[in-house]
Image (tube, helix red, strand yellow):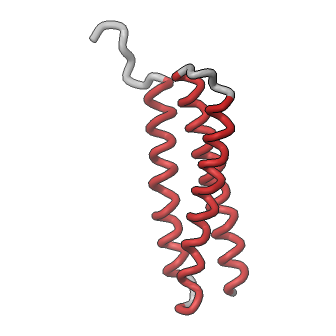
Amino acid sequence: MPGTTLFSMETLTVNGSLFLIGLAPVLTGVVALSLPAGHRLEAVLALVVGAGVGLAGLAIGTAFANSEIEAEQTAFFVASIVGFISVLVMLGVIRRRSS
């Protein structure tokens, strides 16, 4: 189609969000495998924290978006980043605690 670009901002924010949301469980699984047998289930708590932080961020971000699609997509992307970072932090805490 004329006027369309391969990498629009909409595509990057949505795909970036989905990438981070998909990468978090992969990293959680890798970290869980490196934990001692009695501590592996603790890694799942990192996903719970990340999902909670992401949903809270999405709720706050979309409240200020005024039903503008670009603002909602940006809020989704930022919430995904913050949720992903919280998963990484929690995995670090769990990893340190189990050693």
Report which quarter residue 60 is drawn in.
top right
Q: Total number of numbered labels? A: 0
Image point (54%, 81%), residue name? 41
Task: Locate the C terminus and report the quarter of the image it occupies.
Answer: bottom right
Depicted 5 relative to depicted 17: above or below: above
Quarter of the image with the N terminus in it = top left
Instruction: Name the residue located 36 percent from the left edge and 14 percent from the top edge.
Output: 4
> Nearest the camera: 86 or 6?
86
* Residue at position x 60%, y 71% in the image: 45
The residue sitting at 59% across, 30% down in the picture is: 74
Whether 66 is drawn above or below 32: the answer is: above
Q: Kindly give the residue lying farthest to the left in the view shown.
A: 1
Q: Does 37 sit left or right of 15 as displayed? A: right
Q: Position of residue 21 (x, y in %)?
A: 49, 51
Q: Nearer the viewer, residue 48 or 31?
A: 48
Q: Is residue 69 left or right of residue 54?
A: left
Q: Position of residue 65 (x, y in %)?
A: 63, 25
- Please indicate whether residue 11 sits to the left or right of residue 58 in the image: left
Give the answer, above or below, for where 11 lies relative to 56.
above
| Residue 18 percent across, percent down from the top left | 45, 45
